[in-house]
Amino acid sequence: MPRFGPGDDASTRRALDMALSVIPKRKNAPDPPPKLRILDIGCGNGALTIQLAKHADGIITALDNHEPFLEELEHRAKTEGLSEKIKPCLGDMHGLGMEDVIFDVIWLEGSIFIMGFRNGLEACRNLLEPGTSYRRLWRTSRN
């Protein structure tokens, strides 16, 4: 199966375009700005990760807990010429263990359903660059 859930490449692209349109510029960023730091949680076999890599100027940390999926992603990335943009990472979405890493975008297209919406937001809120729309969303949703 190319995807492990509903949706298609066009839907992923529309969602990515919306997400990218609200990302604020990093403070004191050089010109041209640095590449986006993207975390794809529960990347599975990489169908969505490949779309992110094709359409976003960034480095994607692709997290999944099933090593054969990450191996398939590595193969797909190499075939598409995107290996330099994707860093497969073996890990658990329920215990990310990335407290010291900051991202500009966190992609949870299928995994937020598995994590639970509130749990997914809670797990990711401190991983985003301060001032992002998500942080504003989090403060609003807590009230």
Image: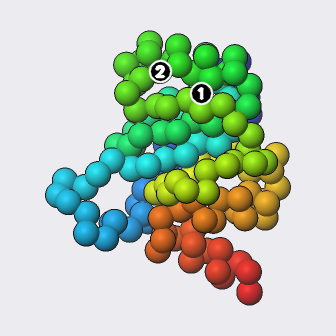
Structural crowding at the residue carrying mark 2, measured as other residues with C-alpha within 10 Å and reported as few (<14), some (14–19) or many (≥20): many
Whole-Å distance between the Cαs marked 2 and 1?
8 Å
Kindly check if marks 2 and 1 are in contact, taking CB atoms under 8 A apart as contact.
yes
Looking at this view, is 14 or 103 the one in front?
103
Q: How many marks?
A: 2
Q: Which of the two discs, 2 and 1, labels the residue nearer the N terminus?
A: 1
Q: Which residue ends up furthest to the bottom in the rendered image?
A: 143
Q: Amino acid at mark 1?
A: Gly
Q: Position of residue 16 (x, y in %)?
A: 49, 49
Q: Is residue 80 above or below residue 54?
A: above
Residue that label 1 marks? 46
Q: Give SS at disc 2.
A: helix
Quadrant occupied by the C terminus: bottom right
Q: Is residue 70 above or below residue 116?
A: above
Q: Amino acid at mark 2?
A: Ala
Q: Is residue 125 above or below residue 86?
A: below
